[in-house]
Image (cartoon, coloured by chain):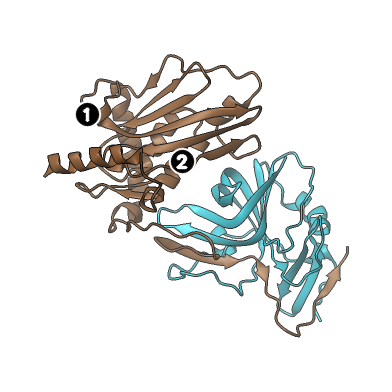
Amino acid sequence: MPMITSIAELPFAERPVLELLRLDDPARTAPDLDYAGFGHARVDRVTLAGAGGGEVRDARLLALHSADDGEALADDVELEFVLDDGSVAALLSAFLARWLPRVRGDERALVLVMCNPHRATLALALDVPVYYALGDVTSWLSDDGELELIAETWRKIG
Amino acid sequence: MTKLAALFAIASLALAGCEAPSKERRERWATTENTNVDINWDKVNKAYEQAEGPEDFERRVNEIYEGDELISVAVQDLEDGTQVVTGFFDKDTSGTVQDAEKIFTIRREITGEGAGQYQTSGYGHYAGYHSPMLSIVSGMVMGAMLSSALSPGYSPRYSQPYTTSAARHAELKNQRTQHRAANPTRYNKPKPSKTGRSYGGGGRSGGGRSGGRFGVRAAPGRVRPVRLTA
């Protein structure tokens, strides 16, 4: 049973972006389907590959994991945090309400690096654009150092 | 041999008007027959979508192009709201587009309030490439070169065409040299194959490395974790 009992206690830390997105293995050619790391990082540039995507500059990436078998919600996503002593779940809305004030800086955009298996439509009122995907999200680093997040479809709020 | 290749390219261009689109024409990579220099058309199209202006676009295009030549750009707004962007090898440094120097054109049209479309076509060695008609709508991530055309008060800026000046060539070459020096793995490796990279399925082929997936798989019989609410 995890010792963590509140969203505020989650170890949601800033991490080096390659480690955060599981891009730290040069030999990896297919997505790590069991990757469970989470946290946030600021990047100068990231490409959202997929319909509705494009290049986003000066963005904070919030790497999160949704549960494939989580509750299907029209406007929210059930997240899962795999910890050393077990897993806990939280709704994205509750998580962001608690953590956005802590992690926000003066970046110009936020990107939710998170699968959205039930294709929830999110509504957030922030002072910067927020990007999120419909369906699966995986990460990719091209040979020329271009950071890409791949999804079927990207949506922008704001 | 060069004349033969040129005749072949011209013949291909002539046939393009009466043939159904072939798989080859939809290929996103094109390879020159003589120099084996690739142009990644996906990146060219993306560069157009994200460019802040002609200078930014020509910088991006020259970073995409992996050959030694410099690509010049001409941008012209026509009276009907159409914009034609031409990439060309300005071999005679005249600052004007000669048909034989053309590499590609991008033709952008405004189709309604806050909406438009564009299509990219290759010329010369790249004559096999024709992009689909690509939609542009307000809300897409795009640079000022495109987004300004969708704004209500838009007035064309390039009725007098913009063309890369000979004086700008040195600056572009310098920028590209710095870019290539900063990305040695891209420019010091065997050229990518004509088949390009595949998208979808959660991964890609081609140069680069894969990362993680951002979901937790549902294993049979697993107990869902406790949901924290505060």
Q: Is residue A3 visible?
A: yes
Label 2 amino acid?
Asn
What residue does disc 1 label?
B91
**Which element type, helix, strand or loop, lies under badge 1?**
loop
Query: What quarter of the picture does the N terminus of chain B occupy?
Result: top left
Residue B184 in percent (x, y) is at 33, 53
Q: Is residue A52 left or right of residue B170?
A: right
Residue B202 lies in quadrant: bottom right
Q: Is residue B183 left or right of residue A23?
A: left
Label 1 amino acid?
Lys
Chain coloured brown: B
Residue B200 in percent (x, y) is at 53, 61
Q: Residue furthest front?
A: B18
Label located before the other in sequence (1 or 2): 2
Q: Is residue B155 above or below residue B226?
A: above
Q: Residue at x 54, y 69 (%)?
A: A31
Residue A21 in percent (x, y) is at 57, 62
What residue does disc 2 label?
B45
Q: Residue at x 27, y 59 (%)?
A: B190
Q: Residue furthest right?
A: B230
Residue A93 in percent (x, y) is at 82, 56
Question: How far apart, in angstroms, are the residues tagged by discs 1 and 2?
Answer: 24 Å
Q: Chain of mark 2?
A: B
